[in-house]
Amino acid sequence: MASGTRNIRMLISQDCFAFLADAMCEFSKKTARFQSLRATVQHACSRANSMDIARQDLDQFLAGRPVDGSIKVWLEVSPEWLDDYNAVRRRITEISGKPVQDKAVIPFVVHLAQVRGVF
């Protein structure tokens, strides 16, 4: 069981910010409720555990979408879904063969949810 809340602070690119905003919009339209970044990422993480993820998927996503930037984004990962988030983060690290920062994990998981029809 997760012990507490994790606060993630990221500096992301304009492109990455626009991508995440579009994903929140897409998820909001699907659910007919306004969705936050937290709700969008939480939903993607809960579904990612059952997805097949290849290193090629990660490499292709990161090559086509720069994540480093100057836009400040905060995400609170609460105890209810911290285990899901940590599991996805570990899995992506194993697939990549190197540590992966949250600012890459979060948009990649949302991307997977989009391309796999979760949103």
Image: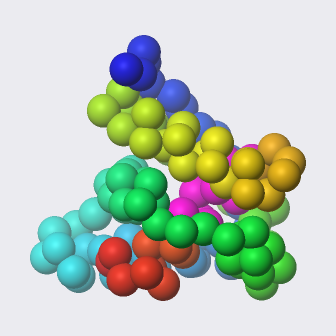
Q: Is residue 77 above or below residue 50?
A: above
Q: Is residue 38 left or right of residue 14?
A: left
The residue located at (28%, 63%) in the rendering is: 35
Closest to the observer, 36 or 45: 45
- Specify the quadrant of the image occupied by residue 4: top left
Residue lying at the far top in this picture: please name it: 3
The residue stretch that appears in magenta: 101-109
Q: Is residue 24 visible to the viewer in this orientation of the structure?
A: yes
- Specify the quadrant of the image occupied by residue 71: bottom right
The residue located at (44%, 72%) in the rendering is: 113
Number of on-image labels = 0
Q: Which corner quadrant holds the N terminus?
A: top left
Q: Is residue 86 above or below residue 60?
A: above
The residue located at (36%, 27%) in the rendering is: 79
Closest to the observer, 32 or 69: 32
| Colouring style | rainbow
The residue located at (43%, 42%) in the rendering is: 84
Q: Reply yes or no: does residue 104 show up in magenta.
A: yes
Q: Reply yes or no: does residue 11 show up in magenta.
A: no
Q: Is residue 30 left or right of residue 76?
A: left
- Specify the quadrant of the image occupied by residue 99: top right
